[in-house]
Image: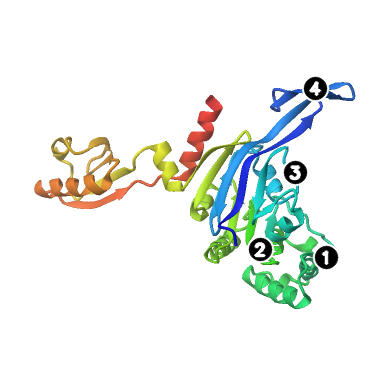
Amino acid sequence: MPETMIQTENLTKRFPCSTASAERGCAPADEGSVNGEALAWFTAVDRVSLDVPTGEILALLGPNGAGKTTTVRMLASILKPSEGWARVAGFDTVRDARQVRHAVGLLTEFPGLYLRMRGDEYLAFFGQLQGLSSDQIHRRTEALLARFGLTEARHQRTAEYSKGMRQKLALIRAMLHDPQILLLDEPTSAMDPHSAKQVRDAILDLRREQRTILICTHNLTEAELLADRIAIIRRGQIVALDTPARLKSQLLGPPLLEVRLAHSLDGYLSELTDLVQIEDQGDDWFRYRTPSPEITNPALLARLAGLDARVLTLSEVSRSVEEVYLRIVESEDGS
């Protein structure tokens, strides 16, 4: 098994436009025309370079139209890149398209189901396409239907499934051939909270089995919960890529810490100004930032103890990936 399961270098995809349009982001081509109109190109994905190691969950975040789905389609050998290249499980997505499609499990944002088929028939059909034996199909289908609570619905036509049930069936289809790589576009879309938790638990189980997973999602809380690293794509380009903790540190500054006392501050803050810079305060609490909490916090607690202050809590104020995402997207909009 290769150490890097997904690798791209300057991966780019352009689509032709009939007419150049500033609103769509189309740019005129150097030459060429279609039916007498000047040919223009819309760059959906622009020189994306990624390395995703075995066993990592990478969340790909971005606004609508940022290039997430196009990137996934190129990784799944559905679209050919205009420039650059991608390798998935060691296979080139253009030269080795058949091997790539067998190596990945793909869940699209709007999975097409054959609505006249029963759930078990649908899975058997796709299992055969992946070259599974009848015994393998039976065992995998039984296990996955039970895992996602669809056993009792297996003999129903998929037209009778709710949106959440259809999404779970499509995810089972992606997992049926036990792929090493999963490309999941909005995996918990349309699901109730219990079903969404089932899917998140399954994704975390797959990571423990050293599967490599790329998730496209607008659910930023889910991304923070699941992802080892987060990539933010904007206008086809990766504008940020790191762990959630490092992104918060880089974009939101040092951690914000809060101290709560068992009594009012009563002038204690004037004794602390040489240790920390106070950012906010209340009757019995104050907040500060420090780039070195492992040094500052013990010194601060020792100073407060020397002043006979009774400390109830010292904790980090929670900061979310949503704050990071909005900081990046809003700064890009303003640039």
Disc 3 crowd rating (10 Å Cα; few below 14, some 14-19, many 20+) is some
User: In the rendered image, is residue 92 in sight?
Assistant: yes
Q: Amino acid at mark 2?
A: Pro
Earlier-in-chain disc, 3 versus 2: 3
Q: Kindly identify which residue carries mark 4.
A: 31
Q: Residue 164 or 294: which is nearer the viewer?
A: 294
Q: Secondary structure at mark 1?
A: loop
Dot in front, 2 or 1: 2
Q: Secondary structure at mark 4?
A: strand
Q: CA distance from mark 1 to mark 4?
A: 48 Å
Res. 117 mark? 1
Earlier-in-chain disc, 2 versus 4: 4
Q: Residue 159 in the image: state x and y as whole percent.
A: 80, 61
Q: Residue 251 or 152: which is nearer the viewer?
A: 251
Viewport quadrant of the N terminus: bottom right
Q: Residue 154 in the image: state x and y as whole percent.
A: 74, 71
Left or right of 91 in this view: 314: left
Q: CA distance from mark 3 to mark 2?
A: 22 Å
Disc 4 crowd rating (10 Å Cα; few below 14, some 14-19, many 20+) is few
Q: How many marks?
A: 4
Q: Which residue does the image show at 13% across and 45% down from the upper left?
A: 303
Q: Kindly identify which residue carries mark 2.
A: 179
Earlier-in-chain disc, 1 versus 3: 3
Question: Marks 1 and 3: CB-CB under 8 Å?
Answer: no
Earlier-in-chain disc, 4 versus 3: 4
Question: Marks 1 and 4: CB-CB under 8 Å?
Answer: no
Q: Which of the 4 image quadrants contains residue 66? A: top right
Q: Secondary structure at mark 2?
A: loop
Q: Amino acid at mark 3?
A: Lys
